[in-house]
Amino acid sequence: MSAVDLHARKVKSHEEYIQNISDITMSFSQSEKEKILACTKQADEFYKKMKSVIYSNASNDSVSEYYKLLDGERIAGFPWKFGLTHKKDKKDYEDGLPHTRKDIIFLSKEQLVYNDIDLTNTLIHEKLHIYQRYNKVLMQQIIKDMNYAILDMNTLNKNEKELIRCNPDLDGNIYYDRLSNKMMICKYNSTTPKNISDVEISNFSIEHPYEMMAYEIASLFYKENLNTYKNI
């Protein structure tokens, strides 16, 4: 992380950042475990039938043909691993936002009060990030099909590089649209951001192809549930 990333996280060093994390981890309560278990089952059921859901939405502009390359059965087969944090004495881990590290999904106490649909949506989103992390060759093929390519960082000036936000769910590359030359990037509003959400964009699906995939795939779960309620 850059000095600007550390400032956004209200720490002065990487060592302090790591120490803060160790100070605010906690165990799940029994009721929280039961809620997560129910939502993980829903998320895996969605992934197992994801291909048919994608085909049924193929005419929808928000659902892309290249997502058919994703292996929903394999995603569902990834084991669920969680870490739980809470805000304590102004210390927080990634501002309490859900994210992944290696094959672990980190949640804060705030996410555990979500209703089941919203929590399941979050889990679908984050589990796809884990799949992306361990299937880089396939992801590069999908990204190419999406008409994105890796940007040469030497084309950015020092100030631009300094303001790029670190996101643990991404692959460390900046991408651009090969047709429009528009970058997918998330930059802080200044060199002294108030938090990690103090950024130039509000639509985080345009930060990176990985985020675009995760938001669009998870949106299919929302759409399915909305349709279910309409039919009651």
Image: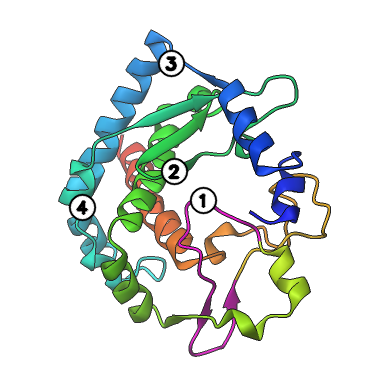
**Mark 1 or mark 2, which has the lower sequence index?**
2
Percent position (x, y) of residue 207? 56, 64
Label 2 SS: strand
**Amino acid, disc 1:** Pro
Marks 1 and 2: CB-CB under 8 Å?
yes
Q: Nearer the viewer, mark 1 or mark 3?
A: 1
Q: Which mark is residue 72?
A: 4
Alpha carbons under labels 2 and 3: distance apart? 18 Å
Nearer to me, 34 or 22: 22
At mark 1, the secondary structure is: loop
Circle 1 is placed at which residue position?
168
The residue that mark 3 highlights is 28
Picture coordinates of residue 135, whole percent (x, y): 27, 60
- Which residue position holds label 2? 101
Residue in the image at 78% along x and 72% along y: 159
- Give the residue type that dot 2 points to: Arg
Q: Earlier in the sequence, mark 1 or mark 3?
A: 3
